[in-house]
Image (cartoon, rainbow, N blue to C red):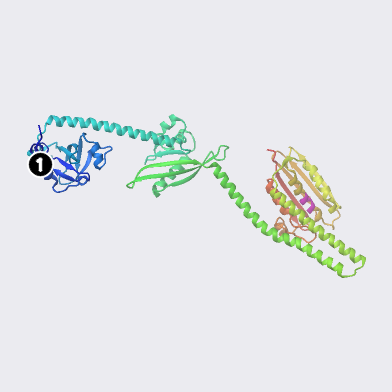
Amino acid sequence: MTLNDDLFHKLFPFYFALDSKLQVIECGKSFEKLFGDERSFTKLFSFLRPGIGITYEFESIKSFSGQMFILDSKTTQHPLKLKGGFVYTHDTSSLLFCGSPWILNERELELNNLKTHDFGFIDSQIDVIQVNQMNIEMTNELMTLNKSLANQKNFYEEILNNVPADVAVFSPEYKFLFVNKNAVKNDELRKWLIGKSEMDYWKSKNKPIDLAEKRIEGFNHAVTAKSDTTIEEVINEGELDEKTFLRITHPYFKNDNLMFLLNYGVEVTDLKKNRDALKQKNTELTKLNSELDSFVYSASHNLRSPLTSLKGITNLLLSQKLSPEENLFFIESIIKTIDKLDATIIDIIDYSRNSRMDMQLSIIDMEALAKQSFSEMEFINLSVNFSIECDNKAVFTSDRKRITSLLDNIISNSLKYSDGSKVTSYLKIKIEINEQHCLIKLEDNGIGMSEEALANAFKMFYRGTNKDSGSGLGLFIVKEILKKIEGSINMDSKIGLGTTTIITLKNLKQ
């Protein structure tokens, strides 16, 4: 039995055929009644079924041949749906759609100006079966979609749980939607957190809520600015397990509606320490550069001036015949000049050594070290009476070489600037040592210093008097040494009365 054209048109008055470019090349009378001369399939219809995997391409539609289709009309004039199926015809290499409108009530017939004679001969029982089958297939598709969504959810959660950062997702009301294992390791606590707020979390831990308030402040700023916001957060501040985090909040908007907030934190404790150390190094470098400029200028002057004097004296000795007494005077001048050069070079070496040398801690007998320093400096002025008292309540630990240099500079100053007009000159030293500190008090009755000299005493190459041939580096070196060994110095001096120096050194035995 062969299906003739007349019978085919009666059975499928809404049929249409598509070529490879999805153009309608043939259609039934009822189809033409509804859609007129429009022949572009993509302008006429969209797919309601199948809904997953199909595209608006000839081969894609062909691959779904044999399945039920529901096509939704895009025209506003005829808001209806066609239900049927596509069949591929080999002789014309086209896709043939056989179906009819999915009409559920008479109102829809009126809206589309359709009459019963516009429809083909169809069995209503088949229609019911097809509707039921469609419901089953749509349910299966929904189950497949839900499974796919669940797999995607598990996939992204697995990624977020394994990133090396604290990650949490919050609702527009700032309630937890998700928190990863890196942020909260306890499974039960993570489950409990869903739907809770930052305040609920910190209250549950019985900890101050200032961190929660700071995080919420970051959320508010991110939402208001509609951009990422970063805050620095310190946990257990001041404790041994102190940690620093950078927390970034990213608000996600859709059509100006806040959908969720993504918050992630990265620990930067070591980076902060390195940053702070770098700042300190930069500060020290700036200071050293400034000191280097001053040092080069002053050192060149302090070294060049004696050399110029030596050159002048030497030329004088060579150019003139002098008496033995005059020769002796000039030779003594040369020796004094050489001593001044030597003192400057020694101080420069001490300064360089202090700036570069690592700390070398050892137990120090401060009384013995002070006595040794005085005995080595005593030749400067043999008329100064020396006394020392020491109260040892603990063992003292520090850097012996730096302490020795410190004492040498302070004691030598007391000897250099003694007052020869006084009947008795003295230097008294008192030392007190406990578990935390070593306190050294040096008191002399020398010539003293003016207020201006006292204010500038610790500057590089400063000399408050022309009495001696010092380099002007001694007290500057003392100040630099004290920075290294965690100490401090305070000097009080009056012209004609003397100088009192109090040095506090940290006990570094810990």
> Picture coordinates of residue 325 (x, y %)?
91, 65
**Horizontal relation, residue 172 to residue 270: left or right:** left
For the view shown, which residue lies furthest in the right direction?
324
Residue 301 lies in quadrant: bottom right
**Horizontal relation, residue 290 to residue 134: left or right:** right
Residue 440 lies, with reference to residue 120, above or below; the image says below
Question: Looking at the image, which residue is at 73% across and 47% down?
Answer: 402
The front one of 224 and 151 is 151
- What stretch of residues is rendered in magenta? 408-413
Disc 1 marks which residue?
114
The front one of 363 and 293 is 293
Q: Which amino acid does label 1 sit on?
A: Leu
Residue 308 lies in quadrant: bottom right
Question: Looking at the image, which residue is at 57% across and 44% down?
Answer: 273
**Horizontal relation, residue 462 to residue 315: left or right:** left
The quadrant of the image that shows the C terminus is top right
Question: Is any part of residue 490 visible from this angle?
Answer: no
For the view shown, which residue lies furthest in the bottom direction?
320
Q: Residues within 10 Å of mark 1 (few under 14, many from 20)?
A: some
Q: Main secondary structure of the magenta part?
A: helix
Say what secondary structure mark 1 lies in: loop
Question: Looking at the image, which residue is at 58% across and 50% down?
Answer: 279
Question: Looking at the image, which residue is at 80% across and 42% down?
Answer: 368
> Picture coordinates of residue 227 (x, y %)?
41, 48
The verdict on residue 412 being magenta is yes
The verdict on residue 160 being magenta is no
For the view shown, which residue lies furthest in the front direction?
91
> Picture coordinates of residue 475 (x, y %)?
73, 53
> Picture coordinates of residue 328 (x, y %)?
90, 63
The front one of 343 and 220 is 343
The quadrant of the image that shows the N terminus is top left
